[in-house]
Image: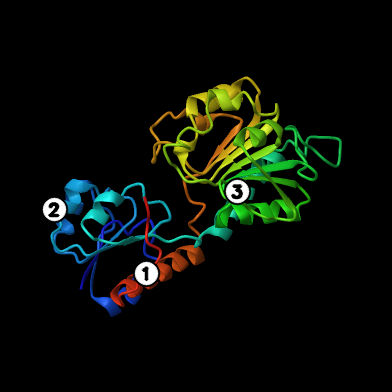
Amino acid sequence: MEIVIIDGHTLNPGDLDWSALSTYGNVTVYDRSTYEEARDRLKNADIAVINKVRLDREMIDALPRLKYVAVTATGYNNLDVAYLKARNIPASNVTGYGAHAVAQHTFALLLELCNRTAYHQQKTIEGAWAQTNDFCYWSQPMTELYGLKMGIVGWGSIGSQVGRIAHAMDMEVLLYSPSEKNISWATQVRHTDEIFSTCDVISLHCTLTPETDRLINAQTLKLFKPGSFLINTSRGGLIDEPALIAALDRGQLAGAGLDVLSVEPPKQGNPLIHHPKCIVTPHNAWAPIATRQRLINMTVENIASFLQGTPKNLVTL
């Protein structure tokens, strides 16, 4: 088997290795590939290991040997799943590998918005604390999470882990999920509007689909409680960014914490990056080394299962 990793750098910039894959074939690794480069580099591949490179109908038709696609991510909107199925080429993704890391990052963003740790550290470095006559100092408002309502949109492995952390912090947890959940310590609502209008913190953990595209927009933002917080560690396309900026400017939201943007890497001058009420991290919630190693291990398991004739974690329309 010829196994070609087409955009491996993000997952493995050199601190991990791909040696486990060599058990199953000849492995070729490319750190980055444009669409045109990928088409050439995958032309002899039996197995394509991809992350963000687009695998559309034109690309698939140019790869006569392709037998299987391993996506090193949970999202697979870069795949033409219907055409892969028509060509009888299975594709698998990896889910659950980053639940703990992304949930941890979700609260890192939220706690920074609530406690302004980096801001107050910088003020301390600048001497503001030393110049006071008091034993304590703060110059930005701080928020206690105890007793506040945490609304979680999407109750998969990440959303449910965020819920458990919120519950452990004595927050009231509300969840929205299309499927029925029975969580003794959380309340399931029937529509996202109930979360938007009643919760102090809204955290997004749903997939990006035509139905959820710009779920957070000018109309839904008007429902948000004044002074609420919005966290997005899922997909940038869930938010209409100009509408979010307007809501932050008018004080509808106290702050937003984003690990994802609609365009990545962002265009120079994206106003969210410099907005005083917004924290933006560079889509790295999933990046702890243990998390990425788990992702590699699970990708290897997917490939092994395919070669054994029992493919698992198959993507669906």
Quadrant for residue 126, please give it: top right
Residue wearing tag 1? 302
Label 2 packing within 10 angstroms: few (<14), some (14-19), many (20+): some
Q: Is residue 72 left or right of residue 214?
A: left
Query: Mark 1: which secondary structure?
Result: helix
Query: Mark 2: which secondary structure?
Result: loop
- For the N terminus, give its image quadrant: bottom left
Residue wearing tag 3? 106
Instruction: Identify whether 115 is placed above or below 218.
Output: below
Q: Is residue 128 left or right of residue 283?
A: right
- Residue 121 at least partly seen: no
Residue occupying the far bottom of the picture: 23
Question: Could you say which is closer to the camera, residue 35 or residue 126?
Answer: 35
The answer to which of marks 1 and 2 sits earlier in the sequence is 2
Question: Could you say which is closer to the camera, residue 277 or residue 314?
Answer: 314
The answer to which of marks 1 and 3 sits earlier in the sequence is 3
C-alpha gap between disc 1 and disc 3: 28 Å
Q: Type of residue at label 3?
A: Thr
Q: Residue at x 59, y 27 (%)?
A: 221
Q: Residue at x 37, y 69 (%)?
A: 302
Q: Type of residue at label 1?
A: Asn
Q: Is residue 206 left or right of residue 17?
A: right
The answer to which of marks 2 and 3 sits earlier in the sequence is 2
